Image (tube, rainbow, N blue to C red):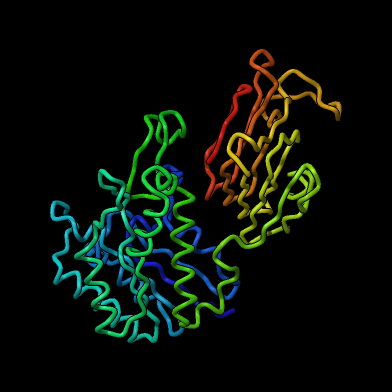
Amino acid sequence: MAYITVWLVGDSTMADKEIKAYPETGWGMPFAYFFDSTVKVVNTAKNGRSTKSFIHEGRWDAVEKGMKGGDYVLIQFGHNDEVPTKATYTPPAEYEANLIRMVEAARSRKVVPVLITPVARRKFDAVGVIQETHAEYAAIVRRVASEHGVALIDLDKESLELLQRLGTEGSKALFNYLEPGEHPNYPDGRQDDTHFSELGARKMAEIVLRDLKKLKLGLEEHIGVNNKEGKRMTVAKDGSGDFRTVQAAFDAVPMNNQRPVTVYVRDGVYREKLHLDSTKRWVTLEGESRFGTILTYDEHTGMVNPQGDSVNTRNAYSCRISADDFCARNITFRNDAGFSAGQAVGVEARGTGLFSRVVGSWGIRISFF
């Protein structure tokens, strides 16, 4: 089968991440899942790279050699080009020349180039107004796009608007903000206003996908889902939704799922032993309110479950997530066996991708928002 390849060329805000960096997520990671089977996304973006270092390391040459007619290349640099104290610093004139070089090389191979302005950093002033940190280099991208007739996605402008709508506190959810002890990769916590959380990467990918549809370059015909929430199912204990139980909604997600599915759970206490199996990826579980939507069960080590099996730590979970690319927000997971009951797991997450926090608890409530 002949694939259309979408090449992603850029820096850490776009890049695939190693497991040791999770939950830091580049927007290119969720982006790859929104296309039909005729499209292959190749993410060559790399942490710390500028246009200069990407070219000098031979990374652009490798992309050039791999591109073929009918492909697309999305180019987003700026974070590392614009900082004079970095070895990757690229003076404005050189930055412009590098962008033009990439555009011309793509066109010479009948590949469609798309220029993307550098995505915003999270920086607010004292009164809560988001600050522009890429003015000069974003302007260069816009100028090159205009003068050379290149498709443009103004991610700088659109991400600034999104951060302003969310405000100083709400916008933290889009970035790699972690409390001490919240994630084993960052035992001392993390406050990172540049790199995205799983949710932030998803939101930036949605902006890029929406703009690709508006640009009408042909690629929009291969975007497999709308870039909002995809399929949506509602769970309500009173029968007013699509399902009365969360597990019933999980069971309704198609096997080998490739499209975003949101399971929206209305307020209530749902006493269920939940499992989302590995064939049902790309699910977002969203509660009506953070402390009003509670998923709980009470199995713990040393007990015998209703099936007559002895419970150990491995199967004492209230909720097990085996699927990749799972996201939970605005919801409480709980194992209410009690502190004296022995080991009892609130959430066990085995998958990778959007939701990569592995949580064990001794009857402790764990909340995601």
Q: Is residue 64 left or right of residue 23?
A: left
Residue 130 in the figure: left or right of residue 273 = left
Q: How many marks?
A: 0
Q: Nearer the viewer, residue 63 or 343?
A: 343
Point out residue 106 in the picture as x, y percentages from the top left corner: 34, 81
Residue 1 is situated, as x and y percent measured from the top left of the image, at 59, 79
Residue 62 lies left or right of residue 351; in this view the side is left
Residue drawn 71% across and 24% down? 312
Vertical placement of 313 versus 324: above or below? Answer: above
User: Who's the residue at 61% across and 22% down the image?
Assistant: 362
Image location (x, y in percent) of residue 203: 47, 57
Q: Is residue 325 above or below residue 333?
A: below
Q: Is residue 246 left or right of residue 180?
A: right
Q: Is residue 52 above or below residue 218?
A: above
The extreme front residue here reads: 127
Residue at point 68%, 35% (across, down): 295
